[in-house]
Image (cartoon, grey):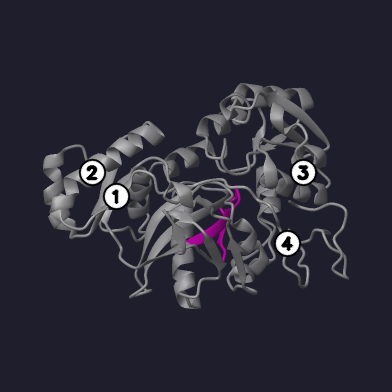
Amino acid sequence: MFNKILIANRGEIACRVINTARKLGIKTVAVYSEPDYASKHVQLADEAHCVGPAASTQSYLNIDNIMSVIKSTKAEAVHPGYGFLSENSVFSHRCKDEGVAFIGPSHSSIEKMGDKIQSKLIAKEAQVNVIPGYIGEVTDEKDLERLGEEIGYPVMIKASAGGGGKGMRVAFNKDELVDSYRRARSEAKNVFNDDRVLIEKFIEEPRHIEIQIIGDKFGNTLWLPERECSIQRRNQKVIEEAPSPLLNQERRTRMGQQAVQLAKAVGYYSAGTVEFLASNKNPDNFYFLEMNTRLQVEHPITEYITGIDLVEQMIRVAADKKVNYTQEEVSQPKGWAIESRVYAEDPLRNFLPSIGRLNRYREPSGKKITWPPGSSKYDESGTKRKVSPL
C-alpha cells in the first residue's frame, strides 16, 4: 500500500479522499490555489502546497505545477477527485511516465470513453444496447433530413465531446432539424472547442440510470446497485436516488452485466459509472448513454446502500491489489439513500443559474450513519467526532 498520496483537487472531494486515506494509514498531500490557503482540505491534509494563483488554469489544472509538488513531496500516487484533471488522459499518461500511480483508470480508457461517438461504437461492438441513431459524425446538412426520417422523430442532436447538457438540441420534426443542428454545433464549438455532433433517437419520458462499476487490473469487474438521476433542471442533476424505483432485480442485473461488458471491452479498472436511459413506458428497454471515467459527485449514496468505500477500492486497485468483494456480495442493495443538490437561480435574471449566497444551513436531525464505510466519523452514541469528512 502507498505511504503518501497527493489529492489533485480541492473542497469536499479532497476532504473525502483524505478521510479514507487516513483510515488506511496513508499520509496525504493537499494542493491549493492562493485564495484557498485556509480551506478545510488544506487543514485536514498532513501537508499542503500552493500550486498557483486563483485561476484554475494556473493552479488546479496546471499539470506541471502539480507534478512538481508530487516530486518534491515524494508522493507515490495521486487521486484526481472529480472535475479538474480527473478525466484528463494527458495527466494520467504523465503520471505513468513519471512513475506515479494514478488513482483512476488508464489513459487509454479515458480517451476511448471520453468521446461519445467512439464510446457508442465500442458499446455496439460489445453487444451493449445503444440508442437507435447514426453512430458517427454528422457533417453535412443534406444528410440530416434523411437521417431524421430513418431514425424517426423526435431526434436528439448531441455534441460528441463534453457533457452537462451542453451542445444538445431536440428536433420534433424536419422543420426544426437544421436549426437544432446548427445551434448544437455552435454551442459545442464554444464550450468544448469541438463541433462534432451525432444524431440519435430522442427517448421520451426517459429515466436516467447510472450503474457504478469497480474493477481491478486482474480482470475482476463488479457492478453495484444503481442510482437514478431523472429529476434534472436544464440537464443538470438535482435529485439522486439509490436504488431506482424503476428497476427490479432482474432489470438491475441485466443492466449491470452490460455495464461490465463495456468496461471489459476497454480494459477498464478503478471506479467508473456507465449511464443508461430507460423507457418509463417500458422499463425493459434501456440504452447506453455514456461512461464517466472517474468518481462521481453522487458516489456516497452508492456507498450508503452497499457499505463499500469506493475511494478505498480505487486506492487498492491503483496499488495493484484485487477488489476484495464478489459480485454476489454486492448485487443486492442494502437500504435506500437520496442526495439533493442545491440548485440556485436568480429570479431577477429570468432564473439564470447563480451560485447564490448560502445564509443558513441546518443539518437534518436523526441517527448518524457512518460514512465512508468503516470510518469513525461518529461514535456509537451518534456524537460527531473531531474529524469530519466534508
- Percent from the top left, x then y, of residue 79? 66, 40
Locate residue 195, reporting x and y percent: 31, 35
Label 4, secondary structure: give it.
Answer: loop
- Between disc 1 and disc 2, whose residue precedes? 1
Determine which residue is flagged by label 3: 1
Q: Secondary structure at mark 3?
A: loop
Please tell me in which quadrant of the rendered image residue 370 appears.
bottom right
Magenta region includes residue 107: no
What's the residue type where badge 4 is placed?
A: Arg
- Residue depicted at 47% across the width and 74% down the height: 247
The boundaries of the magenta stretch are 210-225
- Of the two numbered discs 3 and 1 in the rendering, the one whose residue sits closer to the viewer: 1
Q: Earlier in the sequence, mark 3 or mark 1?
A: 3
Quadrant of image for the N terminus: top right
Residue at horizontal 67 percent and vertical 31 percent from the top: 100
* Dot 4 and dot 1 residues touching (CB under 8 Å): no
Looking at the rendered structure, the secondary structure element under dot 1 is: strand
Whole-number angstrom distance, CA of label 3 to CA of label 1: 47 Å
Amino acid residing under circle 3: Met
Instruction: Please state if 50 lies on the left or on the right of 23 as rendered.
Output: left
Q: Is residue 221 magenta?
A: yes
Name the residue located 45 percent from the left edge and 59 percent from the top edge: 232
